[in-house]
Amino acid sequence: MEQTEDTIAAEKNQTVKSNFGRKRKAWVIVGVVCGLLFVGGLVGGLIYYYTSQANKSNSPPSTADPPSTDYSGNTTIMLDPRYTRSFWGMDYTPRGSQMDLGCTVTQDDVIEDLKILYQLTPRIRLYGMDCAQADLVLNGLNRLGIDMGVVLTLWVDDNQTTYQRQYDTFWKVTDTYGFDRLTGVSIGNEAIFRKQATVDNLVSKMDQMRSALADKGQTHIPVYTTEINDLDKLLPHEDALMDNVHPFFGGTTAETAANWTWKYYYEVDQYPTIQYAKTNNIQIPAVISEIGWPSFPPNGSVQGAIPGIPQLQRFMDDYVCEANRRGLPYYWFEFKDEPWKQWMFNETRESYWGLFDENRQLKNVSLPNCPMDVWTKGDLAVPQPLPLTTTH
Ligand SMILES: *[C@@H]1O[C@H](CO)[C@@H](O)[C@H](O)[C@H]1NC(C)=O
Ligand SMILES: *[C@@H]1O[C@H](CO)[C@@H](O)[C@H](O)[C@H]1NC(C)=O
Ligand SMILES: *[C@@H]1O[C@H](CO)[C@@H](O)[C@H](O)[C@H]1NC(C)=O
Ligand SMILES: *[C@@H]1O[C@H](CO)[C@@H](O)[C@H](O)[C@H]1NC(C)=O
Ligand SMILES: *[C@@H]1O[C@H](CO)[C@@H](O)[C@H](O)[C@H]1NC(C)=O
Ligand SMILES: *[C@@H]1O[C@H](CO)[C@@H](O)[C@H](O)[C@H]1NC(C)=O
């Protein structure tokens, strides 16, 4: 399987813009997709590896009073020449938004984050509704007078009260801030992978959310889950396929990580959506909901994949602008380090995937420079690259 400049150029020229939601269009497909054998092996390794780890990207529940949305700072965004708006999207967990740890998140801190995030990406994706994180983000955007597309996640674990709390908060938040900046609603993140939910369980929650949104006249907002397991079973019930894709856990070197990712994306994410579209004449986009590289600890390698800043730099250099050029949608994982994961999950690497450390200091990397437009309200379009083509 080879990807030449010609096929990439052809892909770019013929990129299909797809709109999410109920107004679905038929696919326009050019090219041939290679077989899945190669990825079967990789995915097996990936899933096996994941399963041997305790927890991932977590956002555990508890009950604490929501923080105040009062803000004492200034709302001036100082443009920093180190930043360009070059990431299609970015994963964001505000500091102190874990209920078990007491909800210490503040509006000031979220606003300082947003001042930077706005210069990095048009879109952000949150992991849960606890600790008023969605209020703080949406209120923060209002205070700053800026627009960014926001994916809200209703965290799913094995306790039904967790979801109910997320669900109730979701409607309070949308009552207050409306639906204008919502680019999607994710029912859970890797809940099946963690064995905390079944496919049927997530499908019924997605159906229910979709019909509740329809009751509010919000049929255009895409509803999906975010998973690494059972993608083919979930796909028919989703408005987008959202898959966390980690070349690091695939054990590939930083030098080969971008190539690994193209193949993985086309074969595991996009290929099933193409098959689904062919059979059902329905198009849904395939989005990478997490992609990134850890910078610490150096002894935390997975085969050839070594955590480190030079490795992060290499993967970012190879991946980000090329993904943009191909029209491949993704959320970079992630904005800031999350040290709490280390002691909560006994997993050091998960804490250090940030471009910035926990105190918002940019790591020793130069960020990619292939700027894109500011997000504008109502923009739910998701680029959809043509499939990887064979050239022989
Ligand atoms: C579920 O979560 C609620 C609220 O945090 C808690 O009170 C309850 O004990 C939990 N149930 C189980 C079975 O863990
Ligand atoms: C506003 O905050 C920024 C940091 O976000 C700071 O650089 C700037 O000096 C502040 N401006 C005023 C007028 O206080
Ligand atoms: C990535 O793939 C392209 C196209 O197949 C190839 O030319 C390039 O050498 C590969 N890069 C690495 C680092 O393997
Ligand atoms: C990695 O190194 C740290 C010390 O920097 C040590 O505490 C830890 O046990 C090491 N982990 C592994 C998996 O070797
Ligand atoms: C934490 O992880 C290390 C290696 O990943 C393991 O050896 C150790 O037993 C774990 N500790 C606990 C309390 O789970
Ligand atoms: C930052 O990275 C560059 C290489 O890109 C290196 O030369 C420099 O020493 C690093 N600076 C620090 C403070 O680690």
Image (cartoon, rainbow, N blue to C red):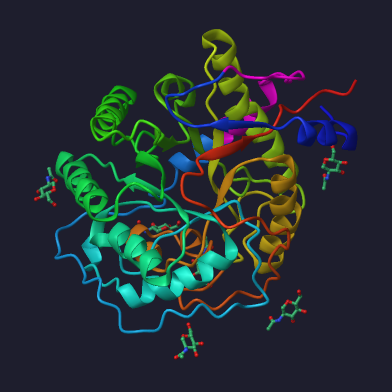
Residue 372 falls in image quadrant? bottom right
Q: Nearer the viewer, residue 90 or 44?
A: 90
Q: Position of residue 38 (x, y in %)?
A: 69, 26
Q: Residue at x 48, y 21 (%)?
A: 232
Quarter holding the C terminus? top right
Q: Is residue 8 magenta?
A: no
Q: Nearer the viewer, residue 256 or 91?
A: 91
Visible in this render: residue 297? no
Q: Left or right of 203: which side holds 7?
A: right
Residue 379 horizontal/vertical position (percent) = 51, 44
Q: Quadrant of residue 26?
A: top right
Does 108 sit left or right of 117 as displayed? left
> Percent from the top left, x then y, of residue 343?
35, 66
Q: Is residue 228 left or right of residue 277?
A: left
Give the image location of residue 175, x and y in percent.
Answer: 22, 50
Left or right for 246, reference 206 = right
Would residue 170 be visible to someone looking at this image?
yes
* Vertical comparison of 291 with 132: above or below: above
Q: Which residues are magenta?
A: 26-45
Residue at 75% over, 42% down: 259
